[in-house]
Image (cartoon, rainbow, N blue to C red):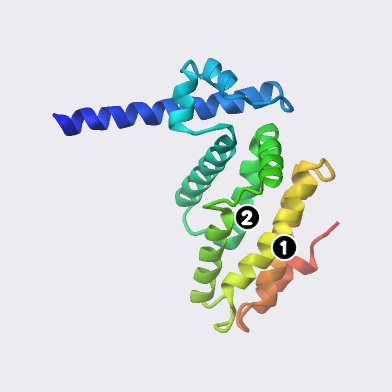
């Protein structure tokens, strides 16, 4: 009986936490540049400020919680799609950002200003996908897939910041990010797969 009650309590906490994060996203969509306070979040989520503090933490922890929610969604998308390789990791990550542009843009700015070091990031998924691609013989056996993934991630982050600043649109954000991964894959391709991986680059408009 105690385990059942404990399970119900944890379920209730999880549901309230989801409401709190959903309320935060709604507030951002309503007023993208507004100051997000614990009190405003609590009012929108219909919980007490103490509940927000207990389940999420102080205001600065809100952005960390939103980042965790972002990664949860990314992992769910990738799991549902199966082994799509590095391109699918990049495509899904960009898709998550552009699906909710107001919230995504504010999150990125807050992460940058606070210097938040994310415990989980798409780089983890990209490293895994690159390593699997090497195992499949698509990449050369001597390739450092962690370094390759980091290079792609750096290019994608650059495109992300351009998108947040409004310098490029959704389509260009995706195009530049996919171009980065395609260049990396072509450069590290095994002899058997080199022509296949270079072909898309030869036919692409990279502007």
Number of other residues with Cα within 10 Å of mark 1, as a class: few under 14, some 14 to 19, many 20 or more: many
- Number of the label disc, if any, that sits on residue 90: 2
Q: Position of residue 200 (x, y in %)?
A: 73, 66
> Residue 38 is drawn in which quadrant?
top right
Q: Earlier in the sequence, mark 1 or mark 2?
A: 2
Q: Residue at x 54, y 83 (%)?
A: 141
Q: Residue at x 46, y 55 (%)?
A: 82
Quarter of the image that includes the N terminus: top left
SS at circle 2: helix
> What label sits on residue 79 in the rendered view?
none
Counting from the top left corner in percent of width and height, residue 42 is at 52, 19
Q: Nearer the viewer, residue 107 or 114?
A: 114
Query: In this picture, is 39 found above or below 3?
Result: above
Labelled pair 1, 2 in contact (Cβ < 8 Å): yes
Asked whether, in this view, residue 32 is left or right of residue 206, the answer is left
Q: Position of residue 19 (x, y in %)?
A: 48, 25
Structural distance between the alpha carbons of marks 1 and 2: 9 Å
Name the secondary structure under disc 1. Answer: helix
Spot the residue most to the left: 1
Q: How many marks?
A: 2
The answer to whether 121 is drawn above or below residue 101 in the figure is: below
Residue depicted at x 55% and y 62%: 85
Residue in the picture at 59% in, 19% down: 40
Q: Nearer the viewer, residue 173 or 64?
A: 64
Left or right, 133 with respect to 167, comes to left
Q: Position of residue 175 (x, y in %)?
A: 75, 53
| Label 2 CA crowd tier, 10 Å (few <14, some 14–19, many 20+) | many
Quadrant in which the C terminus is drawn: bottom right
The numbered disc on residue 180 is 1
């Amino acid at each position: 009986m105690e385990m059942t009650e404990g399970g119900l309590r944890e379920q209730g906490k999880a549901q309230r936490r989801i409401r709190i994060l959903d309320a935060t996203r709604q507030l951002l969509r309503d007023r993208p540049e507004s100051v997000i306070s614990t009190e405003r979040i609590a009012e929108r989520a219909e919980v007490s400020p103490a509940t927000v503090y207990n389940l999420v933490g102080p205001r600065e922890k809100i952005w960390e919680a939103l980042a965790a929610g972002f990664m949860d969604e990314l992992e769910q998308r990738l799991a549902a799609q199966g082994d799509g390789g590095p391109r699918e990791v990049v495509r899904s990550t960009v898709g998550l950002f552009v699906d909710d542009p107001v919230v995504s843009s504010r999150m990125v700015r807050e992460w940058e200003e606070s210097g938040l070091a994310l415990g989980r990031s798409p780089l983890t998924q990209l490293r895994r996908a690159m390593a699997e691609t090497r195992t499949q013989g698509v990449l050369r056996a001597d390739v450092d897939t962690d370094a390759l993934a980091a290079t792609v991630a750096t290019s994608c982050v650059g495109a992300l910041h351009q998108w947040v600043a409004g310098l490029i649109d959704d389509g260009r954000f995706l195009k530049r990010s996919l171009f980065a991964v395609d260049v990396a894959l072509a450069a590290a391709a095994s002899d058997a797969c080199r022509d296949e991986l270079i072909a898309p680059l030869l036919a692409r408009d990279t502007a």
